[in-house]
């Protein structure tokens, strides 16, 4: 009976399991992908105008939906396009985000705005589950606690977010490259195996992580800035409300704010990443390997040809895509976390009410210490 009381007074009444964390992030990933895919299709079409020659060499590339990078060299999600014009190769010159939305909708149909949604979901769900679950587990490992003074643990969200992003991107990167090869031409699994084997033989095992550098340069700083901003806003709101949880609207606005700041700061790396992804589907013959693999040379080349305008291409669609993506993702994630917390507490016979932070602090202080 005493053990039961300790269990009810302890962290179990407020925590959720890793499996429940995965379910929460999975739900958020699906909702986010459905909403932000049209914005990312427009952003890629605008940025790709800076490098039109690549669209006539059978290139396929990846794109980011606000969560992770995903492959989309297909027409309306139907795999290899049966027509000569895949969605990312269709002609058109767009003067801005509004013009791109109008032209694509009028000339290609509204469904074209969701081009490649199935492969997006196929990679978004596992990538997001890895990312958010690692983030939550790392926060626990580092001793993050909302009842403690924030000034003593402000670094934890940034470090946890950076490490979680590195793990997620590194694990997913080889799968992205393999899918690029599969969708660039019709390959059997045997052909794919030989192709990957030849690639490793010619370029080394690390060639499976080609493009990882630009991805990390964009995504790791993004995660650091995003989680620092979001957790700062969150703890401020909780302290003012004297409440253990934010509302859905508060989480939505906090996520949008943090995502916007992070998106603007990391935009040049997003542009470079897009250009690198276009090259991933090509067979590039170059004696100067550094020219093919160096992110710095790619930045210099783009700056010389396009100036700062080229490095900041797609600013508006990136903000309009990333801000709601981050808002939907984190608010959905927090909503399902709260749902599972309530479910766990009811199963333990210890329902959670909207109590004060003082009560939360008292409960946490009674957690039995374990070695």
Image (tube, helix red, strand yellow):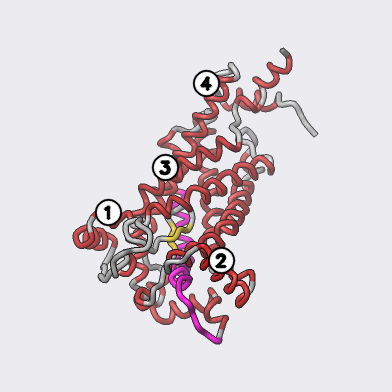
Q: Quadrant of residue 366?
A: top right
Residue under the point 42% across and 42% down: 253
Q: Mark 2 falls on what kind of element?
A: helix
Residue range highlighted in magenta: 258-287
Total labels drawn:
4
Q: Quadrant of the C terminus?
A: top right
Q: Of label 3 and label 2, which has the lower sequence position?
A: 2
Q: Of label 1 and label 4, which has the lower sequence position?
A: 1
**x and y percentages locating residue 37 in the rendered image:** 36, 53
Mark 3–mark 2 Cα distance, whole angstroms, equals: 46 Å
The answer to whether residue 84 is left or right of residue 328 is left
- The label shown at residue 111 is 1
Relative depth, front residue between 240 and 59: 59
Residue assigned mark 4: 353
Mark 2–mark 1 Cα distance, whole angstroms, equals: 34 Å
Q: Of label 2 and label 1, which has the lower sequence position?
A: 1
**x and y percentages locating residue 43 in the rendered image:** 35, 62
Residue under the point 60% across and 34% down: 17
- Mark 2 is surrounded, within 10 Å at the Cα level, by few (under 14), some (14 to 19) or many (20 or more) other residues, namely few
């Amino acid at each position: 009976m005493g053990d039961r009381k300790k269990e009810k007074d302890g962290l179990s009444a407020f925590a959720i399991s890793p499996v429940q964390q995965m379910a929460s992030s999975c739900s958020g990933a699906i909702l986010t992908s459905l909403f932000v895919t049209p914005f990312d299709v427009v952003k890629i079409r605008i940025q790709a105008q800076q490098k039109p020659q690549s669209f006539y060499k059978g290139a396929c590339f990846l794109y980011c939906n606000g969560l992770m990078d995903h492959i989309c060299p297909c027409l309306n999600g139907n795999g290899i396009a049966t027509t000569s014009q895949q969605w990312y190769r269709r002609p058109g010159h767009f003067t801005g985000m509004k013009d791109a939305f109008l032209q694509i909708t009028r000339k290609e149909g509204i469904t074209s705005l969701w081009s490649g949604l199935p492969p997006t979901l196929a990679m978004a769900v596992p990538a997001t589950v890895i990312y958010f679950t690692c983030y939550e587990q790392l926060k626990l490992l580092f001793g993050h606690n909302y009842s403690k003074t924030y000034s003593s643990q402000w670094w934890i969200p940034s470090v946890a977010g950076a490490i979680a992003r590195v793990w997620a991107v590194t694990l997913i990167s080889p799968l992205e490259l393999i899918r690029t090869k599969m969708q660039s031409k019709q390959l059997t699994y045997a052909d794919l195996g030989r192709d990957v084997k030849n690639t490793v033989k010619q370029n080394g095992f690390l060639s499976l992580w080609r493009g990882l550098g630009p991805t990390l340069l964009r995504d790791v700083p993004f995660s650091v800035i995003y989680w620092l901003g979001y957790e700062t806003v969150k703890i401020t709101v909780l302290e003012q409300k004297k409440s253990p949880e934010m509302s859905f609207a508060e989480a939505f606005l906090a996520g949008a704010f943090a995502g916007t700041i992070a998106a603007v700061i990391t935009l040049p790396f997003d542009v470079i990443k897009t250009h690198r992804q276009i090259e991933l589907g090509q067979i590039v013959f170059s004696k100067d390997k550094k020219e093919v693999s160096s992110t710095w040379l790619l930045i210099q080349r783009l700056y010389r040809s396009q100036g700062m305008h080229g490095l900041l291409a797609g600013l508006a669609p990136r903000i309009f895509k990333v801000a709601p993506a981050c808002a939907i993702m984190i608010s959905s994630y927090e909503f399902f976390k709260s749902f599972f917390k309530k479910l766990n507490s009811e199963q333990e016979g210890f329902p959670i009410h909207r109590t004060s932070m003082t009560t939360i602090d008292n409960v946490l202080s009674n957690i039995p210490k374990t070695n």
